[in-house]
Amino acid sequence: MSGNSFGTLFKITTWGESHGIGVGVVIDGCPAQIPFNEQIIQDMLDRRKPGSSIASTSRKEPDEAIIMSGVFNGVTTGTPIMIMVKNKDQHSDAYKKFADIFRPGHGDISYQAKYGIRDWRGGGRASARETVARVAAGAVAKALLDKENINICAYTVELGGIKAVERNLDLISQNMFFCPDNDAATKMEKRVKKVKSSGDSLGGIVEIVAKGVSAGLGEPVFDKLDADLAKALMSIGAVKGFEIGAGFKASSLLGSKNNDPITPKGFLTNNAGGILAGISNGDDIIMRVAVKPIPSISIEQNTIDLKKKKRTVSISGRHDISAIPRINVVCESMVSIVIADHLLRQKAIR
């Protein structure tokens, strides 16, 4: 098992490294005659590409998607879809000084332990650059879900300790952090500027909601819908925590408060997060992920080298201050891929 593929009927395999020729994905199992083209991918990639906010790296990648196969005359053909995005703004020489040093918080030391070799140019396969492929695959999944009137949306609810109070999704496009609370977004901007000037980085929380998902998606026991969603989101490099519905708060609730009362018109509350017994119940599916601070910081840190000698390292250059907001569309894409997969699985048995 290589761990580079995900999904059952709607299956994706990503490939490529941060400073290689490019990154990309192969999507197998997408039904035929789904309207699709490069612009649909580009609209998603533009939300992820560098320079989208003051928290982002200054690396200038156009992230232009090329559909290599599986699409003809503006629709999917039912055959494998291959999408490639070329890397065009790599500064590999800037990473030579880290060739024999393990950067704290990065995958350098664990990749070395697993393979006995690592691509030190920008982190290689462990780089967030890999998520370009996930977003491209997410664009395909979203095109499929559009036909079912299913909508997936991700937004920032916390950044650097600043929490969004309001949940007005109409405001997401009005600020650089894709936050549903403009007052909180203003405070986030100030926080980012302050931390950026100190050479440090920030983490936060992204909330993802799936609307229009019919009841019945998900498999019993090991392929529960929430279990697959957790795996999909936790597979994103910067994500360190996952919760759904009431999440960890449920541990402090009484059963009488945690249970969602059922009426002829539906559920009165949504502590379950739209999933019961691993199967969607027709309500909105609401998830949150904890995103760690970017590990590349200019503050000096203790580490070791390949010979296990003590070293110090300071990482300057073109790095994000926070994975938020660029990670938001990655989360949205992974949720779309899971829902698309389970939608096809449900259609196969009903």
Image (spheres, helix red, strand yellow):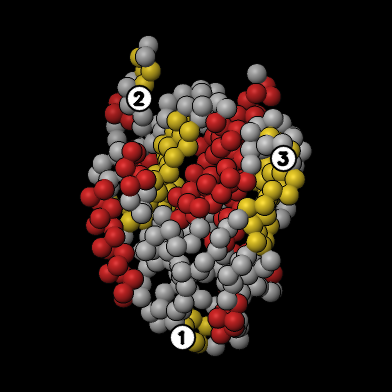
Residue 312, numbered label: 1
Q: Residue at x 25, y 51 (%)?
A: 184
For label 2, the crowd category at 10 Å Cα-Cα, with few meaning under 14, some 14 to 19 and many 20 or more, is some
Where's the C terminus, which quadrant? top right
For label 1, the crowd category at 10 Å Cα-Cα, with few meaning under 14, some 14 to 19 and many 20 or more, is some
Q: Nearer the viewer, mark 1 or mark 3?
A: 3
Asked whether, in this view, residue 116 is left or right of residue 226, the answer is: right
Residue 260, numbered label: 2
For label 3, the crowd category at 10 Å Cα-Cα, with few meaning under 14, some 14 to 19 and many 20 or more, is many
Asked whether, in this view, residue 263 is left or right of residue 230, the answer is: left
Amino acid at the residue labelled 1 = Thr
Q: Position of residue 9 (x, y in %)?
A: 69, 35
Q: Is residue 346 above or below residue 122?
A: above
Disc 1 versus disc 3: distance between alpha carbons?
50 Å
Amino acid at the residue labelled 2 = Asp
Q: Nearer the viewer, mark 1 or mark 2?
A: 1
Asked if labels 3 and 1 touch by Cβ distance under 8 angstroms, the answer is: no
Residue 74, numbered label: none
Asked whether, in this view, residue 129 is left or right of residue 56, the answer is: right
Helix, strand or loop at disc 3?
A: strand
Helix, strand or loop at disc 2?
A: loop
Q: Position of residue 349 (x, y in %)?
A: 67, 22
Q: Residue at x 46, y 83 (%)?
A: 313
Which residue is under mark 3?
71
Q: Nearer the viewer, mark 3 or mark 2?
A: 3
